[in-house]
Amino acid sequence: MSAQYSEKVMQHFTNPHNVGEIPNADGVGQVGNPVCLVSGTIVQLNNHYREIEVVQDNERVLTHEGTYSTIRQRSTREYSGPVIMLENDLGTVEMTPEHMVLAIKRSEQNEHDHDGNEAMSRPEWYHVNELEPGDISLYPILKETWDRDHFALCSENGVSDHRGVDHPENVPLDADMLLLSGHYLAGGNAITTATSPYLCFTFDADAVEQQNEVVRIIKDKFGLEASVRPGEDNQAALVIVNNANLSRAFVDVFGKGADKHIPDIMMFLPPQKQAHLLRGLWRGGGQIENGRTGLWAGYPTASIQLAGQVKTLLLRQNIIPLMNGDAGPVMENARHQTYRIYVNDAASLRKLCEILGADRVVSDTEKECSWIKDSYLFMPIKSIRSRQFTGTVHNFEVADQHSYATDSFAVHNCGDMMYIYITVKDNILTDVKFKTFGCGAAIATSSMVTDLAKGKTLEEGLKITRKDVAENLGGLPPQKMHCSNLAADALHEAIHDYLRKQGREPPLPPGAKKPHEDEACEVDEALPIQIGDSPPKQ
């Protein structure tokens, strides 16, 4: 939490009081702010990426904890007002101003160490309109792991290839198979027509080692002979496998063209196994080059799914990726948009070269802007822009962690949302607890309002104001005052809920009148309404 908070706020944020839900509470108060993301936002689902507007209920989304959780419910609404665009080196996201992002605030007294030994504030959910360029966003690294020894490589239509040998359908998921899979995803193609089906791998003409690698693995794994042929312009070489079943199987498992993707069984393997897949991908279609600013590595693909998956593979190897959705120089004339993944910081390049077996000298550079620690990528926010927006916005209710990852930021699934639970006996608030999904100030104000209310009468509880909450915390920054509003409002709503359940009418706010109230029948202000009793007769 940033240095602008008082010591009392910090105490209640780090060690909140009265946390939890009261079973069968006498009254429950719920308040919160609706927040959303604009259409077109890319969300990281269970091993694939999709626009937020087409995501379905019960799909699994990556949370800020690095695990997948179920989307309980989607919501959409029409919105007209400002939206804020955040950008970092993974991409951009646009959201309504109160949406929360997992981040760390920077200040002159709070500089970070790029080795990850930062003396910074703890990560917190910040409203996007509080963030500034240079603040640090946190992006989760996938933690879920499922190890497998074999996987099914078979064609869905089950058509036999009478011209050749049928391949085994249950294939060992070892280093060679992962390497071959990477080669196909990078530069492979499958022709599945009935007249001339074949599997093809494309390489640079001088990439003889990679060509021989594919020929060997095809022979070892499937008992098939592959041939190497020159491309039409003699700048490329083609490794051809004439087998209909194998061609169909590769398309069924990995897709083709702009629809290529890594199957689930490979995306959840342990990182040490995934290194072989990453090696095949890069050796088949990636680059490691010396540029004007030093060594860099790049990987282009026309598949948005594959681009996101390569990002995930790199992060699991503690390699920092930089994402660029523009057409790169190698594929600028391609029919599809090209997504490029770059690696250019020294520590990440060393790890990538080790995986690829590339003998390259990586010199130390200036201190890097981003780093990886505790299963998060810490990456500075490059720019923040605002624009007026009119249209449909979207959000999710996510089980467990109440958060989800876009392709570039970890966001909360709600604005500040507070639940206050009360137990009442003889007109006394005998127990008051809270659950809050929100920023640090929201947690601190919720904690404080429960302290202020516990042991009070219902009348005294209703007299607790937003100002009382803020003052008892030693003050709040202006942009966080709404959190004290929400905490006090949630307490009042819980008391009102209790009164309604008792068949009593909650008192009106000071100065308010009942709807359609006849001025001639106003209640005498000198006659107080006691909450513990029935309303007096007029």
Image: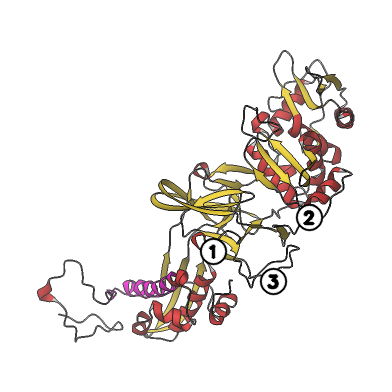
Disc 3 designates what residue? 119
Is 533 positioned to the left or the right of 370 in the image? Answer: left
Q: Residue at (69%, 57%) from the top-left corner?
A: 369
User: Identity of the amino acid at label 1?
Assistant: Tyr
Disc 2 designates what residue? 365
- Front in this rendered view, residue 413 or 70: 413
Image position of 354 with respect to 445: above or below = above
Residue 233 covered by magenta stretch? no
Q: Nearer the viewer, mark 2 or mark 3?
A: 2
- Front in this rendered view, residue 323 or 254: 323
Mark 2 burial class by Cα count in 10 Å: few <14, some 14-19, many 20+: few
Numbered mark located on residue 390 in the image: none
Q: Position of residue 407 (x, y in %)?
A: 61, 48
Q: Quadrant of residue 122?
A: bottom right
Residue 497 covered by magenta stretch? yes
User: Identity of the amino acid at label 2?
Assistant: Thr
Element under disc 3: loop
Q: Do the numbered discs 1 and 3 sit on residues whose CB atoms are within 8 Å?
A: no
Image position of 465 with respect to 283: above or below = below
Q: Is residue 419 at least partly visible in the picture?
A: no
Element under disc 1: strand
Disc 1 designates what residue? 126
Q: Nearer the viewer, mark 1 or mark 3?
A: 3
- Front in this rendered view, residue 385 or 418: 385
The N terminus: image quadrant: bottom right
Q: CA distance from mark 1 to mark 3?
A: 19 Å
- Colour pattern: secondary structure
- Farthest residue to the left: give it: 520
Q: Position of residue 135 (x, y in %)?
A: 60, 62
Which numbered disc, 1 or 3, marks the residue that appears first in the sequence? 3
Element under disc 2: loop
The C terminus: image quadrant: bottom left
